Amino acid sequence: MKRLIVAITGATGAIYGVRILEELRPHPEWETHLIVSNAGALNLRYELDKSAKQVSELAHVMHDIRNIGASIASGSFPVEGMVVAPCSMKTLSSIAHAYADNAIARAADVTLKERRRLVLVVRETPLTIAHLRNMLAVSEMGGIIYPPVPAFYAGFNSIAEMVDYTVARILDLFSIPFTGALNRWQGIGREAGGAHE
Ligand SMILES: Cc1cc2nc3c(=O)[nH]c(=O)nc-3n(C[C@H](O)[C@H](O)[C@H](O)COP(=O)(O)O)c2cc1C
């Protein structure tokens, strides 16, 4: 059994966290541990008209954001890694500074200290120097900064496809196969593989 921690915070893009959980459902070898921040719950309601409780049904285990005694708050609890999707600038800041005052920041801190994979789907525009420095700090500690910026060459027909492309690329980072169809880049022209011949 492989475990993945999925955290949903209060940046816009709650759909990313939900789609990651949905995509993990058909993979019986993966156990998902969900944490939703208070602002994350607010945005789930605002953007998707879903409660955190409804979203928790997609996960195997739900942890309270206040429970810093949760299993995932300890490095002795084996997990493959953690994805924060979406990741607010506030949560990014707490992770960058090891300010582990809630279950999301603590689980991310543990993920970094145990040298496990941490992916932050950070979202804000424009970015201040503080945001950029915090991203650099996490990157220097081995975390992966993955802003959900669309790859327009993929030729999306809908926002759902655009979201799924990002979700698939995040899952790639954990070697989890995406279940849906995906228009992966094949190269341009004859020399590069013939995708556009
Ligand atoms: C509708 C809405 C959209 C927001 N979008 C963002 C965003 O894209 N990025 C961000 O850093 N904060 C955003 N915020 C602000 C965060 O929710 C706020 O800073 C919050 O304290 C983050 O807390 P958390 O990291 O514990 O979830 C948004 C808030 C609301 C209500």
Image (cartoon, grey):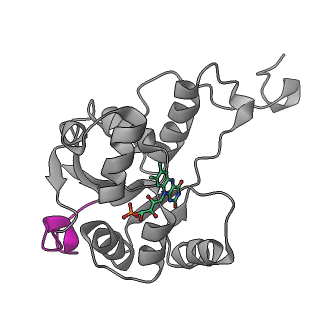
Seen in the picture, residue 184 relative to 71 is either above or below; the reply is above
Seen in the picture, residue 173 relative to 163 is either above or below; the reply is below
Please give left or right for residue 136 compared with residue 179 in the image.
Answer: right
Seen in the picture, residue 139 relative to 124 is either above or below; the reply is below
Residue pictured at 18% horizontal, 37% vertical: 57
Residue pictured at 40% horizontal, 57% vertical: 84
Please give left or right for residue 29 compared with residue 89 in the image.
Answer: left
Q: Nearer the viewer, residue 56 or 139?
A: 56
Number of marks: 0
Boundaries of the magenta span: 67-79
- Residue 187 locus on image (x, y percent): 77, 32
Residue pictured at 29% horizontal, 58% vertical: 38
Residue 167 is covered by the magenta coloring: no
Whether residue 179 appears in this view of the structure is yes
> Which corner quadrant holds the C terminus?
top right
- Residue 48 locus on image (x, y percent): 38, 34
Residue pictured at 52% horizontal, 74% vertical: 138
Q: Give the overall secondary structure of the magenta segment.
A: loop
- Residue 128 locus on image (x, y percent): 67, 71
Q: Nearer the viewer, residue 178 or 105?
A: 105
Task: Give the quadrant of residue 152.
Answer: top right
Q: Residue furthest top?
A: 197
- Residue 142 locus on image (x, y percent): 50, 73
Seen in the picture, residue 127 relative to 183 is either above or below; the reply is below
Whether residue 20 appears in this view of the structure is no
Please give left or right for residue 75 compared with residue 45 in the image.
Answer: left
